[in-house]
Image (cartoon, rainbow, N blue to C red):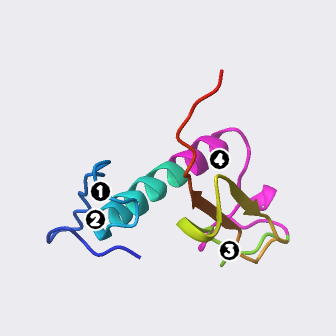
């Protein structure tokens, strides 16, 4: 969880690649970026049919649950997760249970094309 950078629900943090990824400011920047990207992906997927009726991940179905769809299952997102490196994973349990997305720190520095 990341605290506001200033009052008024401001979450403005700049990633500094001259600092270690685990620097507190870099972690805060990573949290904010991951939150933004995950919510954008959710909103785009929603437009293409990944709705409450299709058992999407949301803490609240806002009264649009339909059928057997359950709420209370927002995605739990972990950035710079220490349980691995150079990878990421996403667990998708049954509806009503939170999805878990873990993104690890990358320590590979060479790119191969």
Pick the residue in front: 21 or 109. Answer: 109
Residue at 73% across, 60% down: 90
Q: Quadrant of the N terminus?
A: bottom left
- For mark 4, give the secondary structure: helix
Q: Position of residue 85 (x, y in %)?
A: 63, 59
On residue 108, the disc is none
Q: Of marks 2 and 1, which one's residue comes earlier in the chain?
A: 1
Q: Of marks 2 and 4, which one's residue comes earlier in the chain?
A: 2
Q: Position of residue 64 (x, y in %)?
A: 67, 64
Of badges 3 and 4, the one in the foreground is 3
Which range of residues does the magenta coloring cover?
Answer: 40-67
Q: Is residue 21 above or below residue 72?
A: above
Pick the residue in front: 92 or 95. Answer: 92
Q: Residues within 10 Å of mark 2 (few under 14, many from 20)?
A: some
Residue 57: within the magenta?
yes
Q: Position of residue 65 (x, y in %)?
A: 72, 67
Query: Which residue ends up furthest to the left in the rendered image?
Result: 7
Of badges 2 and 1, the one in the foreground is 1
Residue at 60% across, 59% down: 103
Q: Is residue 62 visible?
A: no
On residue 46, the disc is 4
Of badges 1 and 3, the one in the foreground is 1
Q: Which residue is mark 3?
A: 73
């Amino acid at each position: 969880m990341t605290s506001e950078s200033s009052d008024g629900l401001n979450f403005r943090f700049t990633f500094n690649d001259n600092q270690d990824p685990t620097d507190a400011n870099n972690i805060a920047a990573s949290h904010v970026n991951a939150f933004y990207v995950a919510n954008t992906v959710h909103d785009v997927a929603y437009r293409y049919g990944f709705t409450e009726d299709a058992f999407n991940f949301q803490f609240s179905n806002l009264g649009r649950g339909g059928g057997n769809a359950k709420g209370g299952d927002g995605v739990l997102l972990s950035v710079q997760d220490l349980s691995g490196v150079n990878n990421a994973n996403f667990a998708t349990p049954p509806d009503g249970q939170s999805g878990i997305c873990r993104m690890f720190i990358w320590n590979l520095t060479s790119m191969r094309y």
